[in-house]
Image: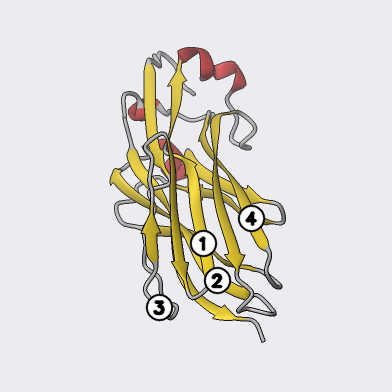
Amino acid sequence: MKKKNIVILTIFVIVLMTSIALAFAYIGKPTNTGTTTANMQIKDISNGITMAYSGNTSVALEISWDNLSLHDASNTYTSYISKSTTMAVKMTTSSDFTKGATCSYSIKYIPTTAFTSSTAAKNAGLKEFVVAGSAGSLSFADYSLADKTTEVTMYTGSIATTSTTTVTHNWTITLKFYNLAVDQNSVMGQTPKGTLSIVPGACVANV
């Protein structure tokens, strides 16, 4: 945070995580069972393929004066406030699939209240508010959530079994707000909100 006479109060950022969108494209109509509010889980069963999506439903990233000192500000993305949560994608195939199956899925962000980046950061081409994710060798790097007003996709991939096995992709999702060496005073008091969704796609048998 920079420059002279800038007073940083508190920015309260809330991003709701893991709003599950069900849009299966594989053969058969899935059966959806069970949800909870604290730890959401929805299971989809079709023709011997079971997909489960779960994760914490919310994470709050609070940013205050103590977190954003001029002394620590940097334009090299070394100074930031972060908060992480977990999401999981689990797949099981029945004995009908002797070689297993492969299902696609994506992770999307759907904004409800946009975060407006500061003019100084925008002019300098710097990221301020981002989301990153990793699940073993799978990942997506800092994806800017600034000025997003429509649904965006951060990750598209697949999960596969080899036989009657269960495979899980355990995602760690991290929100970051970067403490930059530019005037970020204009972001003070913003409360951006949105949802991160695991969206299932098509499933096919391995051959």
Residue type of the residue flagged with mark 1: Met
Please state which amino acid type lies under the numbered disc 2: Cys
Q: CA distance from mark 3 to mark 1?
A: 13 Å
Q: Position of residue 12 (x, y in %)?
A: 37, 24
Left/right placement of residue 122 relative to residue 178 reads: left
Decide: marks 3, 4 in contact (CB < 8 A)?
Answer: no
Residue 125 visible to the viewer: no
Q: Which label's residue is closer to the chain start, 3 or 4?
A: 3
> Are the two marked residues, 2 and 1, in contact with CB atoms closer than 8 angstroms?
yes
Return the residue at label 1: 51
Secondary element at image label 2: strand
Residue wearing tag 3? 28
Task: Name the N-terminal-most of marks 4 and 1.
Answer: 1
Horizontal side of residue 118 vs 70, given as left or right: left
Q: Nearer the viewer, mark 2 or mark 3?
A: 3
Q: Earlier in the sequence, mark 4 or mark 2?
A: 2
Of the two numbered discs 3 and 1 on the same chain, state the one appearing first in sequence. 3
In the picture, residue 160 is in which quadrant?
bottom right
Give 158 or 4, whichever is nearer the viewer.
Answer: 158
Determine the secondary structure under disc 3. Answer: loop
**Which residue is at 30% across, 43% downward?**
114
